[in-house]
Image (cartoon, rainbow, N blue to C red):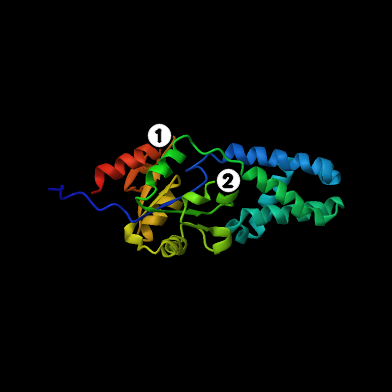
Amino acid sequence: MKPFNRRPWPKAILFDLDDTLWPIAPVIVQAEQTLFAWLASNAPRVAERFTIDSLRQARLELLARRPEFQLDLGALRRAGLVAAFEQAGEDADKVELAMTEFFAARNAVIPYDDVLPGLLRLKGRVLVGSVTNGNADLQTIGLAHHFHASVAAPSFGRAKPDAAIFHAACAALGVAPADTLHVGDDLLLDVHGAQRAGLRAAWMNRSASRRHLDEGVQPDAIVANMDQLLDWLKREHA
């Protein structure tokens, strides 16, 4: 007889991407360095007038004036480059080439060692999807074939913690929110947002932080990696 406190496996698992499946901060640093090297060779007047830091500061000032860019940081970066090109007297038609260079580097992520084995262990057991506020491209990264559906804030038009983006991912997978588990690193955007949308939520706490106690968020599970997530699923679910 099965223990009364065990629940059925979720029908679907949604994953956040950046800082859940791979570290993003070093990737962005490298991508900005790659972009600036491209500017030095292809738009030298921009590289002479600006630095990586001053371009970043200009983006922050633009974001303060136009908070709608928070929904798409790629669009914010593009707008910042357009302004920088115009100020430097460079050909703004080159901006799209610069963005192509940046996005290629931004998607040169290295998944945590546990990610691919974990995704493979989930294959055939649950539907797998992703929900991200960022610009990660699973096709470029080479992981798209592990996901049945992916919803990204820049293209969807709503961002976590808005319930709509979680519901859109559930609808794309054909499952109810109550039958779905969301896994992410951000307590408020991922865990609290998913729970408010009617999903269960696991906190991917790779840094062993106890911040959830300060935030007052109670994840359904706290795991440090995909192995612990799978162990929790097997232990708590029939």
Q: In the image, is residue 66 above or below residue 206? A: below
Name the secondary structure under disc 1.
loop
Residue located beneath label 2 in the image: 141
Q: Kindly identify the amino acid type of the residue bearing the numbered disc 2.
A: Ile
Q: Quadrant of residue 214?
A: top left
**Where's residue 23, x and y in %?**
53, 39
Q: In the image, is residue 56 above or below residue 224? A: below
Residue located beneath label 1 in the image: 208
Q: Nearer the viewer, residue 161 or 201?
A: 201
Tell me the distance, in whole angstroms, between the alpha carbons under discs 2 and 1: 27 Å
Q: Residue at x 65, y 60 (%)?
A: 66
Q: Nearer the viewer, residue 80 or 223?
A: 223
In the picture provided, is 198 more to the left or to the right than 77? left
Q: Nearer the viewer, mark 2 or mark 1?
A: 2
In the picture provided, is 148 more to the left or to the right than 110? left
Q: Residue at x 61, y 59 (%)?
A: 67
Q: Kindly identify the amino acid type of the residue bearing the numbered disc 1.
A: Ala
Query: In the rendered image, is residue 14 in sight?
Result: yes
First along the sequence among labels 2 and 1: 2
Q: Nearer the viewer, residue 131 or 115?
A: 115
